[in-house]
Image (cartoon, grey):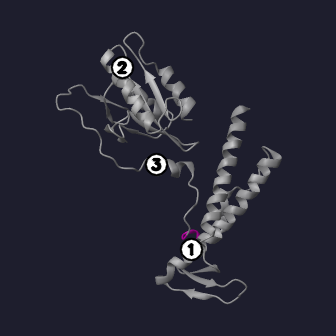
Amino acid sequence: MSKIITDMQLRKKQLEDVIKLTQKALRKAPHGNLRSSKHGKKYYYYSTKAGSKSYEYISVKDMNKAKLLAQKEYLLEVQRLARNELIFLTTRGCEYPVKTFESAISKLSLGKQVLVEPIWLSDAEYAAKWKSQEYEKLPFADDNKTEYYTNQGERVRSKSEIMIANTLGKFKVPYYYEFPLHVPLIGEIHPDFRVLNIRLRQEYFWEHEGMMDDGTYSNTVVERIRAMEKIGYFPGQNLIMTFESKSNPLSQLNIEENIKHYLL
């Protein structure tokens, strides 16, 4: 029951954000409406002023005008559906309207759909966009002869990191390995994993500390955590921490518990 309530709260917040986004975007929207027609494989577009029945042809060089008018029509429908759903959630709880704002684009003709940029990406689209970032990976030392590879064929630095990476893959959690992060006064660091909770669209860094028996290593860990706190990353909030020592190795259960708590 608590998950249902949490999901409803998240959906309300999403709807409120979408309504604000549409309001902001519509302030800059042009006047008029758009009509499209198809001849053969090509679409043709026409604009009209409010209250007028006469249309004016939009040439290829003015195609941005057609895109703006199509986007306006789409945003108005998104806003209408989002407000409708928000009312349903607020007054009727779990009883949902037939259509949600994600279906707004289907209300447009195909000719207009090709011009529109969705205001809210699906989870799959959002995850794919998040995962498309390029970065320079931290190199391995030439004398490092020990090689560890994940199920995805990615080289990591320890057996524990193999376990974490493979379990993230098992639960379909998008991640980057050793993505660079700039810390003032220290410079560039590379936390073990940068991960994404797709449902919440929230990003975390995941640090695994694997030699807690070593006093020098432990002190370095403390300094690193404090440095990350200074730029807004706090353990238990947006920084996931796992630890191990020789007598207390990292377990599969511990990894899965963290994934289920933070990332699903």
Q: Earlier in the sequence, mark 1 or mark 3?
A: 1
Please name the amino acid that badge 3 sits on: Trp
Measured along the vertical axis of the image, is residue 246 above or below residue 34? above
Task: Give how far apart the Cα atoms at labels 2 and 1 are.
Answer: 56 Å
Residue placed furthest toward the left: 143
Which residue is tagged 2? 218
Residue 182 x, y percent position in the rendering: 36, 42
* Residue under the image location 64 percent in, 88 percent down: 55
Please name the amino acid that badge 1 sits on: Leu
Residue 111 x, y percent position in the rendering: 58, 74
Pointer 1 local density, CA inside 10 Å: few below 14, some 14–19, many at least 20: many
Specify the segment rendered in magenta: 111-115
Which residue is tagged 1? 68
Q: Is residue 79 left or right of residue 121?
A: right
- Disc 2 vs disc 1: which is toward the camera? 2
Which residue is tagged 3? 130
Question: Which secondary structure, mark 3?
Answer: helix
Q: Quadrant of residue 94?
A: top right
* Residue under the image location 56 percent in, 78 percent down: 66
Q: Is residue 87 left or right of residue 22?
A: right
Q: Earlier in the sequence, mark 3 or mark 2?
A: 3
* Residue under the image location 47 percent in, 36 percent down: 233
Q: Quadrant of residue 157?
A: top left
